[in-house]
Amino acid sequence: MKNGTAKLAGLVSIIAGIIFIVAGAVTWGVITSNLADQNITVAEDSKMLPGDDVNGPFSAFAQAQIINEHALHATEGKTYAELGEEVRAAEESGDTARAEELQGQRTTVMNASFLRASLFTSVVSYGVAAFVIGMGVLLLIFGAAFNSLAKAAPATVAARRDDGVPARV
């Protein structure tokens, strides 16, 4: 009975491992394909992977980082929320030209934030895909171990006397 359970656990683990590995690899491929279709290149002034095509987790992360730097440079380091306060203050003082200029900067920061969020979603998705592949490999190892135990069990049982004491072989 225990031998059959180990065999079943081994078989289920191996099948699940194969499914996990395939699912993770397909996910990785879909993310890579979708990023590559966007024809994004990491900005030349990036500290990490300048000029690289964005088609993997590291290039997506590098591009997200440089987008943030560019947005902060364009707004003199001001965030979306800070610019909102300045827009309101300019409108209240009647300086519509300044309010429009600040709103333009605010729109730039907002767009940068959306782009960064999309790229970071890709980075996280790559991490999940790698995790699933790793779990699949572990399941394959566990499945092989269970099958090994199932094969070894009959030999152990055969080498014992009726009273459970190991027999001399």
Image: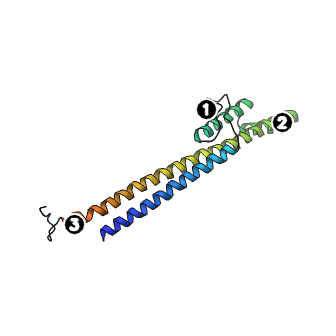
Q: Nearer the viewer, residue 89 or 25?
A: 25
- Identify which residue is drawn at 81% across, 37% down: 104
Please tell me how crowded label 3 is: few (under 14), some (14-19), or many (20+) other residues with Cα within 10 Å.
Answer: few
Labelled pair 1, 2 in contact (Cβ < 8 Å): no
Q: Name the residue under label 2.
A: 99
| Residue at image location 61% in from the left, 32% down from the top | 49
Q: What element carries label 1?
A: loop
Percent x, y of residue 10: 38, 62
Tell me: residue 84, above or below residue 46: below
Q: Locate residue 22 relative to residue 14 in the image: left or right.
A: right
Instruction: Residue 49: give its label.
Output: 1
Q: Can residue 121 be seen in this view?
A: no
Q: How crowded is mark 1: few (under 14 residues within 10 Å), some or many (20 or more)?
A: some
Inter-mark Cα distance, 1 to 3: 60 Å
Tell me the kind of residue under disc 1.
Answer: Leu
Q: Name the residue under label 3.
A: 157
Q: Please tell me which residue lies in front, 91 or 73.
A: 73
x and y, in percent, of residue 21 in the image: 50, 54
Percent coordinates x, y for residue 48 in the rendering: 60, 31
Left or right side of 148 for 114: right
In the orientation shown, which residue stands out farthest toward the front? Answer: 169
Q: Which residue is drawn at 84% across and 36% down?
A: 100
Give the mark toward the camera: 1 or 2. Answer: 1
